[in-house]
Amino acid sequence: MPLVAAPLVVLLRSGRAGWLIAAGVSVASLAGALALAARVRAEGVLSYALGSWQPPYGIEYRIDAVNAFVLVLVGLVAAVVVPFGRPAVAAEVAAERRYLFYAMLCLALAGLNGIAITGDAFNLFVFLEISSLSSYVLIALGRDRRALVASFQYLIMGTIGATFIVIGVGLLYLQTGTLNMADIAARLEAPGAARATLAALAFLTVGICLKLALFPLHMWLPNAYTYAPSVVTAFLAATATKVSVYVLLRFWFTIFGANLVFERLPMPDIFLALSVLAMFVASGIAVYQRNLKRMLAYSSVGQIGYMTLGISLDNVPGLTGSVVHLFNHGVTKGAMFLFAGAIAMAAGTVDLDRLGGLAKRMPLTCAGLVIGGFSLIGVPATAGFVTKWYLVLAGLEKGSLLLAALPAASSLVAIAYVWRFVEAAYMREAHPDLAGVKEGFAAPLVGGWILIAICLYVGIDSTWTVEAARRAAAQLLFGAPQ
Amino acid sequence: MSLPGHFTYWITVFLMVAGLYIVIARGNLVKKLVGLSVFQTSVYLLYIGPGKLIGGTAPIIAPGYSVYSNPLPHVLILTAIVVGVATLALGLAIVVRIREAYGTIEEDEILRADAHAPQRGGA
């Protein structure tokens, strides 16, 4: 549906109509995702043969507990960010380009939904490129000229990543003669992994890790997030990397099987090491950033570490933690980038040195950012706590106190960078530049607070998200939700 | 496992690595894109090569046609070519804008320009 909407927006050539359509489409995709999730819960795996070609010959859309969850996340973030982001877009994108902006947003949404929904490996690549190409354009629309360079960097890295994924898919296809994910999995089950299977696994893993910005393949992310228009950052930060994590889960667990990935290869160790490095190093870099958006971007790289950590532990609490963190972090970071955008619009800067005393000027925005920060740290009663809780449980189940202590320890680093904002906004003398600054436009604020409210709600009453994530984890590990 | 028997694979791997090397080693943005294209093209070969049988024709059900090439890789690669063209076009468009903004398309000069530029606040 967003795919149909995009050319429509271009044809209308009007920013207002574009916004209306984009907002309508994103709300509709949330509704669709929720309806699908409810049906998956009730009926199990859904399958839809595109163009009535029966799988494995035709392209199949296949929805189970895992991608229903991802679809809801993407729909939710889009439905909040797009309708409430209008003033931010108006402030940051030139009027004559605004309709193109919304068209690209629709395309990105379509691509992300497509990645999540498809059951066909090559189709996944096509949707991946749809969403990537549109996000390069979105990033390049930033006001700063450095946005162009960031976008170009992302284009190079993203294309290399995507090409690696195609190579991986190609090798799988050469071996099995099929592109349907479930079918590939069934045919690969023959004992004794061939070299080509391992090569395919390697290509796919590296390609996907480029896309999900796993440390040390994250170089494109901070620049892209810093210089993109804030609506784009909020949308992409909350969805794009999360969908890539989903792709990784899908390939590892559904296609290659946990047996191959985790028992015969040193994958869990490698991922464990990289995740822990991401958690500490990227968060450590975040502490030293002066630019608020860049700080949040590095914190994203760190938070991705939590997701891959949970994956590498390969047990139900760990995967539950990972999947639930997709949602928790998506919601939290979406909100924080919206607030950062609101600050950029009102104060004209997101440089921490020049934001002294901001809390007096923009109390609501700052309070929201702080609560989001609490969630990044993992303070109880925020969404982040739930994730940490499950990761610690997963570490304990592995019988390692060290693994259990790591997520807790990395919270300390998170405290450091969140504190830098708190210190600047609340403790410091008002910066002279901020004299006339008031709370900005209401809309991004409302959007941000809706996401923060969700973040608090799932922090306090996590039954819904955790239940859904646990079903997804069981689906991945055992092939059926339990 | 003879060398000539794996001819297409050798070509593919050579193009792949050469393309990737250009992307990494060249500072000129247009050359980077060229490398990226070479890299992507190698993947087309990876798909097409094994799908082709010597003497194979398009899969037509008619007397006289008995050996078919596998049509599916061709279809897939047609899609991949479209994606590649779109990527290249977008990349070149961004290079044009970078040139407008910076007056150069050499990576190191751009980085230098940014390092000297006054830190503009905001997005």
Image: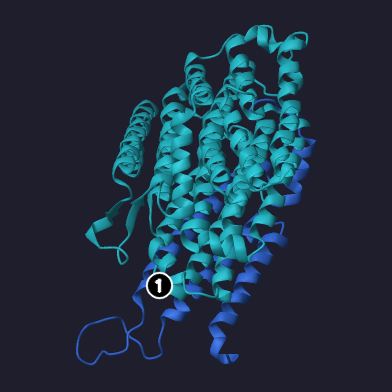
Residue drawn at (59%, 32%), measured in percent from left and top?
A143
Mark 1: which amino acid? Pro
Residue beneath label 1, please? B73
Residue drawn at (77%, 36%), measured in percent from left and top?
A284
User: With respect to residue A157, does A69 lie above or below?
Assistant: above
Chain letter for the cyan colouring in the rendering: A
**Image quarter (top left, top right, bottom left or bottom right) of the N terminus of chain A:** top left
Residue drawn at (73%, 42%), measured in percent from left and top?
A401
User: With respect to residue A369, does A161 lie above or below?
Assistant: below
Residue B37 can be seen, yes or no: no
Label 1 sits on a secondary structure element that is helix
Residue drawn at (72%, 51%), measured in percent from left and top?
A273
Instruction: Report x, y in % for residue A251.
Output: 50, 58
Quarter of the image where one finds residue A375 = top right
Quarter of the image where one finds residue A422 = top right
The residue nearer to you, when weighing B4 against A375, is A375
